[in-house]
Structures are given as structure tokens and as C-alpha cells.
Amino acid sequence: MTIWDEKKLENSTGADVAVFSKLMSEMYDQSWYGILGNDEIEFFLSWVQGKRALEIGSGTGRITIPLLEQDIDIFGVEGAPGMLKKLHSKVNGDADTLRFILWNAMNTPYPADDCTFEMVIIPFSTYGLVHNNVENLGENRLLGEISRLLVPGGYLVINDWRVGEFDRSLVNKEQEPWVHEHSHPEHGTIIEEQCSFFKLNPNRILNQQIIRERKTTLTRKNDSKIMEQFQESIPIWDTLDFPLLGQDAGFEYVKCDHCHFHESPSVHHIFKKK
Ligand SMILES: C[S@@+](CC[C@H](N)C(=O)[O-])C[C@H]1O[C@@H](n2cnc3c(N)ncnc32)[C@H](O)[C@@H]1O
């Protein structure tokens, strides 16, 4: 089954967002990214049970597939063709394939009517990633669109790594690189190195909007060949910023809960559409 307007989908120019390249898509399920935290699926299940739900940035289906297996009426938008291809390879039949579309989450409006969903979920810090290179963050475009898509009283859950206030003394200073190893089915070990630089870029909603400029290099370990290099500009919102974003888009901010789905703690921001 699908709720997506096929005419509008046909006319779309596709997505191919800069994050989660073909190489990353091939490694995602085997890397730490692909691990499903023990409580994670129970948490999302408790929110989407019995509701028509939308996941923003469905990826390879880490969350979506277990939810579909529990007969949850879930749909998704995903911007990276490689990630979506993996997800599609895991679903049963065309009806479920049609639930998940190649769509840039910042391309609004989505091909769906007002009040189509009762629940929207954005797991795994995807909210920031989706805003890679987005200009005019003060438009608050994504939350505005989610508000349009949700029925009154519908909920939005955003899971994010940022558990407190960002340390602003880090702004405009070189940071130590973050290095992590992945296992690629063909290339063996791939080293991911991220170099970040933080700056402030005020907008209509926040005069302390933090932007992370991040340069990522993916290097094959056995011959030190650089396989990919990309630059991202990803906004960061404090726990204190999320209520303002929601308020600006017609949400009541319900609460912020801490959790331990993975090694590092993270938070859920829970919003209710007014
Ligand atoms: C950290 S992964 C999370 C994937 C999945 N939700 C999970 O929990 O495993 C972030 C996902 O968001 C997708 N994404 C990033 N920017 C996007 C955008 N502008 N539109 C749609 N999807 C996007 C990426 O391609 C990637 O699949």
C-alpha cells in the first residue's frame, strides 16, 4: 500500500543527498551504525503501535524493518539511493516497497496530503544530518512540514545525541579528529576520519545557532587509498533549542527523556501537534 501521490513523485527530480554515499551505504549494516540498541525498537514500537507513522531518513531499515515485521503501518522518506536500495531489498513485496520513497526530506511539501500521519519519528540524530548544507535554517522548514503532515494531537519523536548544552568554548577552534573503523564487504577495513570545526551562524529563531563544518575521509586500510572525501555543514541544536523549534512550528514540547540505546547517551525530544 502507499499513501504517496505518484504523480508528484514522478515529477520529482530525485534526491541523492550528500550524506550517506554509496560506500557508506554498503558498510552501514555491518558497522556500529547498523546495531540496534536493546531498548530502541521497544521504544519506537511503543510510540507507533496502532498509528500510521512516517520515518524521516529511513536508511537501510534498521528501525523500519522490525516495525514492519510487527505490522506497523509505517512509511518513509530517504534521500540516499544506496540506503534506500538496501531497505527495499529487505521488505516483502511491492506493496511494502512503495511505502519508502527516494525523497530529500528538505524538499517540501512532500507528496502527501495534510494530516496524513499520526506519528513521525526521526531516530539516530538524523534531524541534524537532514539539514546538511541547508540555507536559511530560520525557516524551520522540516518541522513546519511535519506539522502539516500530522493530524492535530499527533506526535513527533526526535532522537538526538546532544544531551545538554553545547560547549561554546569549542567554537572557532580546531578539534581533534574522530576516527572509527568500518568493515566493507569488498574493501576490508575502511577508516573513517572526521575533522570538525564549529562556528556560530545566527538565524531568525536562534542567535546562537551552531554549525559543524565536518570533513570526512574514508581510507582503505590495506593500501591507504582514499576512497572518498566529503565536506558537510551540519547544524547542531542544544536540548534547550528544540522546544523553540517546535513552538515555532505549532507544536507543544512535551518532554526530553534521556536514554542509552548505544554506547553514548542520547535524548528523545517529544512534541505534540497542537
Ligand atoms: C544516521 S542514518 C539513520 C538511518 C535510520 N533511520 C537508522 O536509524 O538506522 C541517517 C539517514 O538519513 C538519510 N538522510 C540524510 N539527509 C537526508 C535528507 N536530506 N533527506 C532524506 N534522507 C536523508 C541518510 O541518507 C541516512 O540514511
Image: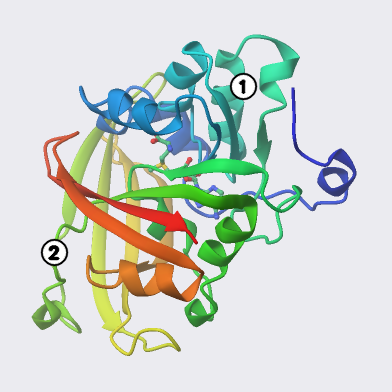
Asked if residue 129 shows in the view, the reply is no
Q: Nearer the viewer, residue 52 or 12?
A: 52
How many callouts does the rendering have? 2
Q: Which residue is tagged 2?
A: 164
Measure the alpha-carbon separation of dots 1 and 2: 36 Å
Q: Secondary structure at mark 1?
A: helix
Residue 48 tag number: none
Which image quarter is the N terminus in?
Answer: top right
Q: Which residue is tagged 1?
A: 88
Q: Earlier in the sequence, mark 1 or mark 2?
A: 1
Is label 1 or label 2 in front?
2
Residue 242 sits above or below residue 158 on the image: below
Three-letter amino acid code of the residue under disc 2: Gly
Whether tag 1 and tag 2 are in contact, CB under 8 A, the answer is: no
Q: Position of residue 201 (x, y in %)?
A: 36, 86
Residue lying at 41% horizontally and 27% vertically, measured from the top left: 63
Residue lying at 35% horizontally and 28% vertically, measured from the top left: 46
Q: Secondary structure at mark 2?
A: loop
Three-letter amino acid code of the residue under disc 1: His
Residue 216 sits above or below residue 80 on the image: below
Number of other residues with Cα within 10 Å of mark 1, as a class: few under 14, some 14 to 19, many 20 or more: many
Q: Position of residue 211 (x, y in %)?
A: 33, 75
Residue lying at 50% horizontally and 41% vertically, measured from the top left: 119
Q: Position of residue 268 (x, y in %)?
A: 27, 48
Image quadrant in which you'd find residue 172 = bottom left
Q: Position of residue 213 (x, y in %)?
A: 34, 71
